[in-house]
Image: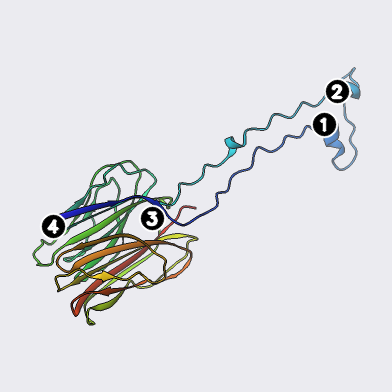
Amino acid sequence: MSSTMEFEGRHTNASRSVKRCPGSPRSLAISLAGLLSASCGHFDVAHPPGETPQDAPEPQDAPEPRDAAVDAVPPPRPIMVYRAVAASTTTAQSLALSLAGPTRPGDLLVLTCADTRDELGAGDVTGAGVTWARAANTTTETNMEIWYGVVHATSTADVQVKLSMPPSAAEFSIRMTLTEWSGLAVDEASVVDGASAQGIGSSATGGTAIASAPPIATTYPMDLLVLGVSANSTASSLASFADPTEGPWTLIDTLGNTPGTTEQSWYRIVQPGPANPMVTVTTSSSRTVWAAGIAAFKIAP
């Protein structure tokens, strides 16, 4: 059984100023004699034979200034969630997520993925015409991973995740959420400004646990911070998540499966500094398994 859902794109609450180049510099009509007299010392201006200084040609009129719009720098694309789609399965070894429309060159795709079997390796995430790279991952029973890819050419190909292990466990599942962003840096080698992940295999805390990735410290002037948390309980009900600390955060999705597994992701815009958000996870079982990952992506200057 699989399920999908899609959300409308929306602008973030981040703002930035756009610097524009000024109009063309004013042209000054300066006669040769005037230019020389403004210099240091005294100069004798020579004239062609038969021509007196009074006969010297008049300076030409200054050219008309160019339209300022010609010299204006086009504003950068706004920081916006262009698309957000999610899918899940409890029966298949692989999961394909339909984009429901072509990607846009210059955008960044971010994938949060959770599964209950094993971690994803190189080549296990494909599609959308991008080269996928992993920013962070865990290796616990409920795994959380964050992947990303820069869109260089338009594509409508599905994004697919394939696990190396078959779905043999009773609570097997794959859950993933894809967002497409405009306004972010598009250099694959340097777009990530920090990332981390960790998970707890079993936490006997009366059904409540605090999920968090190891702290990171961002250094870029402004980043998009993505947080993903997953939980798996032995009970037949879904886990619930409190709002992350260090907010405010914007919820991307709540994607759950039965029995006892769920995944949730959020984002916010951050300035340079430490980041260590925590999420309270509550289940109806005394055994709570969780994983959390964060990744900071640079916003285009």
Query: Which amino acid, by three-letter code, is at mark 2?
Result: Ala
How many other residues sit within 10 Å of disc 2, few (<14), some (14-19) or many (≥20)? Answer: few
* Residue found 90% across the figure and 24% down from its top: 53
* Residue at image mark 1: 32
- Height in image: 199 above or below 191? below
**Residue 111 in which image quadrant:** bottom left
> In screen coordinates, is 193 left or right of 127?
right
How many other residues sit within 10 Å of disc 3, few (<14), some (14-19) or many (≥20)? Answer: few
Query: Which amino acid, by three-letter code, is at mark 4?
Result: Gln
Q: Are marks 1 and 3 in contact (CB under 8 Å)?
A: no
Considering the numbered disc 4 on the image, is that residue within a helix, a strand or a loop? Answer: loop
Q: How is the image coloured?
A: rainbow
The span from disc 4 to disc 2 (Cα, nearest Å) is 89 Å
- Height in image: 120 above or below 244? above
**Residue 190 in which image quadrant:** bottom left
* Residue at image mark 2: 56
Q: Can residue 40 be seen by looking at this rendering?
A: yes
Q: Nearer the viewer, residue 42 or 230?
A: 230
The span from disc 4 to disc 1 (Cα, nearest Å) is 82 Å
* Residue found 21% across the figure and 76% down from its top: 288
| Image location of residue 178, percent across then percent down | 29, 54
The span from disc 1 to disc 2 (Cα, nearest Å) is 10 Å
| Image location of residue 143, percent across then percent down | 22, 67
Considering the numbered disc 3 on the image, is that residue within a helix, a strand or a loop? Answer: loop
Q: Nearer the viewer, residue 97 or 94?
A: 97
| Image location of residue 127, percent across then percent down | 24, 48
* Residue at image mark 4: 93
For marks 4 and 2 on the same chain, the one whose residue lies earlier in the sequence = 2
Res. 189 mark: 3
Q: Are marks 1 and 2 in contact (CB under 8 Å)?
A: yes
For marks 3 and 2 on the same chain, the one whose residue lies earlier in the sequence = 2
For marks 1 and 2 on the same chain, the one whose residue lies earlier in the sequence = 1
